[in-house]
Amino acid sequence: MIYDIMIYRKISIMETNINLKVDGEKYINLAKNTILRERANIQNYISNCPEFLTSYTPLKVSPDAPNIIKTMAKAGEIADVGPMASVAGAISQFIVENAIKYNCKNIISENGGDIALRTEKDVVVGLYAGSSSLSYTIGFKIDEDKANNGYGVCTSSGTVGHSVSFGNADAVVVFAKKASIADASATSIGNFAVGAPEDAINKCLEKAEDIEYIDGVFVVMGEFAGKIGKIPQIVKTDEKIVKTSMGEYFDMI
């Protein structure tokens, strides 16, 4: 596969806005179909179980629930949050996993800062942390061994975007094999970003220690940052390149 011929598209379907870089055009249509199917599964389940939409705590779901519902519920249970905390990461994850079933070798799906990927080459994921001076200046290099097996990088913020957060972190970035778990965990950890920056970051990192199935966490609050676990190599990024690269978040090297 020649990486220069990968294509980039924005896909917007109702509240779902995907930045997608992928091997070929056929996977764009596949991604659209995946979004439509999984959104329908979520909406249909909510119509029968409204609490799935509103709960801030983990929920049990029916044994015959669609796979995406079970995936979101499991992520919420792991991170101790409601299932909808993982919705963006779960949709990205399902886009990538479905493309892999059709022999896609390289795909990166970003959904509101929540990334699922599978590539045969190293990937740099750029950091966006609102008004912090770290925004667009550093990134995380996902090595090809991790990327080739599928990986998730998800960000929660109390100062950027529309996601619900009870904390004030500019960015809580979680790294995990599954984007659904990374997404739910980022929300859970971000809820502890309360108080003075240094204290808030320490609270977040303490919470991160209690969550299974995540590799590492990087927290930014203003001009302060902290990390825990095994996070990817931090690299410098060029602001102009990061802002104009596909999705404004990531690129392959």
Image (tube, rainbow, N blue to C red):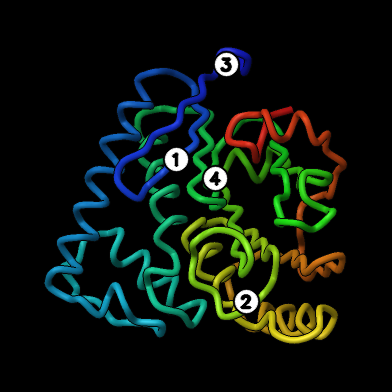
Badge 3: how crowded within 10 Å, few (<14), some, or many (20+)? few
Mark 2 falls on what kind of element? helix
Q: Which of 74 and 235 is in front in this view?
A: 235
Q: Nearer the viewer, residue 232 or 50?
A: 50
Gap in angstroms between the C-alphas marked 3 and 1: 23 Å
Residue at 69%, 36% in the rendered image: 123
The image quarter containing residue 32 is top left
Location of residue 23 in the rendering, given as x and y in whole percent from the top left corner: 49, 21
Residue shown at the point (57%, 49%) measured from the top left: 151
Give the image location of residue 38, x and y in percent.
Answer: 26, 50
Mark 4–mark 1 contact, CB under 8 Å?
no
| Vertical relation: 76 (above or below) 112 | below
Q: What is the number of the mark on residue 189?
A: 2
Q: In this view, does 106 lie to the left or right of 239?
A: left
Give the residue type at disc 3.
Met
**Residue identifier under label 1:** 18
Q: Marks 1 and 2, how far apart in space? A: 24 Å
Q: Name the residue under label 3.
A: 1
* Residue placed most toward the observer, 22 or 132: 132
Q: Separation of disc 4 and disc 1 at Cα?
A: 18 Å
- Label 3 secondary element: loop
Compared with 83, 22 (above or below) is above
Q: In this rendering, would 242 be left or right of 58? A: right
Q: From the image, tell me which residue sits under label 4.
A: 150
